[in-house]
Image (cartoon, rainbow, N blue to C red):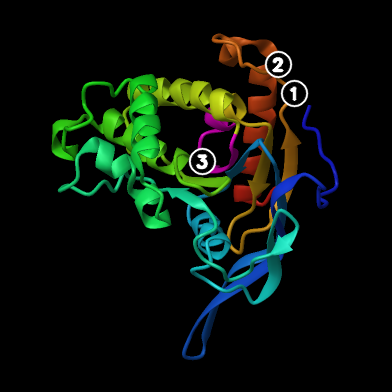
Amino acid sequence: MIIEKSISASDAAALEIQGISLAFRERRQELPVLNDISLTVPAGKFVSIIGPSGCGKSTLFHVIGGQLKPDQGTILMDGQEVTGQRGLISYVPQKPALFPWRNTLDNVLLAREIAGNANEAARKEAQEWLVRAGLGGFEKSYPHMLSGGMQQRASFLRGLLAPQEVICLDEPFSSLDELTRSDMQRWLLDLWETSRRSVLLITHSIDEALLLSDTIYLFSGRPASVLHRVDVPFARPRRENLAEEPGFLELKREIGARMRAEQSKKPI
């Protein structure tokens, strides 16, 4: 059973996206990408977006991060309008994007350095998180010495230790093999349970969204619009065998059916 509610602002919202529309223009050509997108990331909650490839999900992240200015709509953080402002979110890309000339510890501390607070206390905190992330002993290793999963963990820690409250994750597991991806999902879930940061995740995986999220927004094809909001009913902390339970499988099937119906433009 998909649970839908009206999309409205929350008094405790870390991030609010209100009526965002955007079209790319080149000469006389116009390509609508985002169509009246509204969603909310409550403080300390994990929110996911599922949508077809090329529908505009990453473009929305560029709007949130201030790299693109929307044609219509506003971005708010903690109730204050921040449309077009940069440096207010922590961003974890699809690939780790670690600097090859910096060791693991220095890569993780990059956001703190940029913010001007990479002091000894910050280094100690980063070293403690590296141990929690299974990277203890690799502080001085360079990216080429780490596996893909280890590089992705370092990328997550860099985002986690950034001073911004909101973390945007852009399909961070897409380049990993299935087994490593499953391990990383569980690792991220455990990490998030400890930190409870406000997270907005883009994913193509229904399983991933259901395992990690409090709320899921289903997007249409381009130009992207919000089709449905799903409030995930599973208690936290999430159980190891959750993906095998009937309620999980039922909700997965229903979300899949809705997305397939959207792609084929046929009613469910």
Real-space CA distance between mark 3 and mark 1, rounded to the nearest whole angstrom: 19 Å
- Which residue is most to the right? 6
What's the amino acid at mark 2?
Gly
Q: Is mark 3 on a helix, strand or loop?
A: strand
In the image, is residue 75 above or below residue 136? below
Residue 245, quarter of the rendered image:
top right
**Mark 1 — residue?**
233
Question: How many numbered marks does the figure carry?
Answer: 3
- Which residue is most to the bottom? 27
Q: Which of marks 2 and 3 is in front?
A: 3
Can you give x and y, in whole percent of width and height, for residue 229 in the image? Answer: 74, 42
Q: Which of 227 and 146 is in front in this view?
A: 146
Query: Which residues are drawn in magenta?
Result: 197-209
Residue 95, quarter of the rendered image:
top left
Q: Do the residues labelled 2 and 1 touch (CB within 8 Å)?
A: yes
**Mark 2 — residue?**
247
Q: What element carries label 1?
A: loop
Q: In which quarter of the image is the N terminus?
A: top right
User: Of marks 2 and 1, which one's residue comes earlier in the chain?
Assistant: 1
Q: Is residue 222 visible?
A: yes
User: Of marks 3 and 1, which one's residue comes earlier in the chain?
Assistant: 3
Q: Is residue 268 visible?
A: no
Q: Nearer the viewer, mark 2 or mark 1?
A: 1
Real-space CA distance between mark 2 and mark 1, rounded to the nearest whole angstrom: 9 Å
Q: Which of 234 and 24 is in front in this view?
A: 234
In the image, is residue 217 above or below residue 77? above
Can you give x and y, in whole percent of width and height, for residue 103 in the image? Answer: 19, 39
What's the amino acid at mark 1?
Pro
Q: Nearer the viewer, residue 265 or 30?
A: 30
**Mark 3 — residue?**
203
What's the amino acid at mark 3?
Thr
